[in-house]
Structure formats: structure tokens, C-alpha cells
Image (spheres, rainbow, N blue to C red):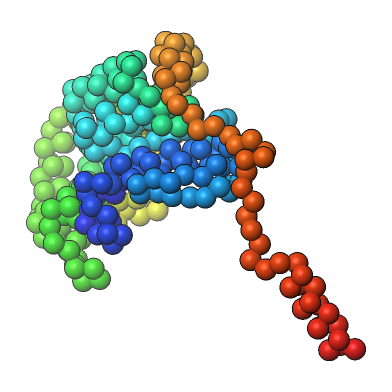
Amino acid sequence: IGEGATRLELGAFGISARTKRAMALEAAEQICNMMMLTPYPGFEGEGFSFPCRNVLPKPLQTPHPPLWMACTNRDTIKVAARNGIGALAFSFLDPDEAKNWSKIYYDIIKSEECVPLGWSVNANLAMVSAFSMHEDRAEAIRRGQDNFEFFRYSQQKLVAEDFTPGHSDMWGDFMEKRGDASDRLIQAAMSRAEYDGAGIGTPDDMARHLSDFQEVGIDQVIFLQQAGRNTNQNICESLELFADKVMPDFTKDVEEREAKKAAELAPYIEAALARKTYMQPLAREDVPVVKAAVRASVFDAQKQREAAKND
């Protein structure tokens, strides 16, 4: 679930920043109902309306795919938790701040504030991270730092600065302002035995980065790869290096950790689902008939005329 953030997104559809959240949550709840009910009874709301229809296909997952919500600050972290939705944190935090977000999120999941938007609770906190790996730290920074910094720059620019569609050159503006920042960062990074590149560096650097997030309660990490002008070759090489040197240490006990977490949260999730008011299915006799636009008698008359012409 993404509310949209910039004037480019919201302005294109005439949506006010003040109403976007309520509209997004209202529509998302009804989409879950569409996936669960046969037929969907219909809904008339403030920003979303839809008649009674059987919406297909129904999902393979039970009861429906897990819900996630894009979160850029503490307020949206709280909104996700109150609605029993996984939080996709698109702010780039240090581990100490991530720990605060994790505590806020799970405290609400375990409280009476949590009333699920969907028909299940997805209690997970995922954090976006930079991603550029190489055995040579300087090369990892050279390949990834500018591209990742551009991703953050473009986010801020679209929110805080004017933009001319089809003419604004964000990459050119970014490179002009950035200058030799990456070269200076490489010089500083190479003088350290350990380096915190937030996902950019050697396999050892990445392992420390992920361990820090794991220790403060982050459930998943999303590697941002397709940023700026990063190349497919560099992305694939980073992925292969990660799979070979880093991933095995973080996957060896994943089933045990997930089972422990599920057992701890089970009573809270059960209580949260009990607080939800579910949309009820319609009885067969209450399902409205969708009237035909043309009656059968009209079709019969048309067929007779066509048959006469053929004769």
C-alpha cells in the first residue's frame, strides 16, 4: 500500500495530501474484501465505491497475500502497526534509530490499538538498504555510492523542489552538486579496518551491516540495487558475491527464528483478529441481479431479421 508522496503523484489525480491516507486505507481494506468474498457485496465510501461483483481471480495464498505499507517516518510506522500491516521502511536509518522504529512497531502490534485492515496480520518490519558489494571496498563504493545517493536525492527533490516534466535533469543537477564526494569517501573508507557503508562495501562490511539490523529487531532487509545508473553487470556481480559469502550465515537458522517469533506473537495476533469487524457475505437471495442492457426479445427479433436477409 503506497499513499503517494509528491505533487507529481497526488496532483496528477487531484488528491489532497490531507486525504490521501484515509483514501488509501479505505481502498486497501475493500481490495482485501474483494479477495475474500464471493461475491464481493459492494461498498460506498468517501473515496472508494464499487458495486456488488464477483472479483476474480481469488488469491492462492490464505487468506490473501500479506499486506505491506510504505513507511517513511515514525507516523506511518504507527499506522502500519495499528492496521496489522508489514512496514516497508523507506528511510535510511542507522541501527539505533531502527531499534526505536522496531520497538514502536511491535509495541503497537501487541496492544489493543492493532485492529487488522485485512483478514490477517503481517507483523514484519523491513528496512531498505544500499547494495553494492565487491572484494575491493573502494570498487564497491565507486560502483554504488553515487547511484544510491542519487536515489535519496531524487526523493527529496521531488518533494521539496520544483520539477518540470520532460525537462528537469535530476542526474545532472545531482552530479554537479556532488562533485568529488565519492572520491573523498573512498579515501576515508580505505583508512579503516572496519567500515560502515550501510550496504556498500566488502562481504565483511555487509555482514556487519546486516548483523546490526538483526540485533535491533529488523525482520527483513531490502537491497536497493536499480538506483541511478547502476549497471546490470555490477548488480549481478554483487548478488553472486552476496549469495556466496554473506547469505549462508543469515539463512542457516531462519526456520528456528521464524518459528520462535510466530509463537511469541500468536496470542497478540489472535486478539487483534478478534477485534476486527469483518464484512459479511451476502445470502444468495440478497445478491443483486445485474440487469441486462438488452432483453432477450430484442435479440430474438434481431436474429429473425438477419435470418430473413440471408434467405
For the point 40% across and 53% down, the residue is 232
Looking at the rendering, which quadrant does residue 300 occupy?
Answer: bottom right
Q: Quarter holding the N terminus?
A: top left
For the point 47% across and 44% down, the residue is 43
The spot of residue 67 in percent (x, y) is 43, 34
Tell me: 150 left or right of 239.
Answer: left
For the point 39% across and 45% down, the residue is 45
Tell me: 94 left or right of 134.
Answer: left
When the figure is inspected, residue 304 is found, relative to residue 1, above or below; the finding is below
Q: How many marks?
A: 0
The spot of residue 97 in percent (x, y) is 18, 26
When the figure is inspected, residue 302 is found, relative to residue 156, above or below; the finding is below
For the point 42% across and 20% down, the residue is 275
Front residue of 219 and 194: 219
Tell me: 19 left or right of 28.
Answer: left
When the figure is inspected, residue 108 is found, relative to residue 305, above or below; the finding is above
Front residue of 275 and 4: 275
The spot of residue 295 in percent (x, y) is 71, 67
Q: Is residue 269 visible?
A: no
When the figure is inspected, residue 242 is found, relative to residue 289, above or below; the finding is above
The spot of residue 155 in percent (x, y) is 21, 50
Front residue of 176 and 18: 18
Looking at the rendering, which quadrant does residue 213 occupy?
Answer: top left
Front residue of 130 and 203: 130
Q: Quarter holding the C terminus?
A: bottom right
Q: Is residue 104 visible?
A: yes
Q: Residue furthest right?
A: 311
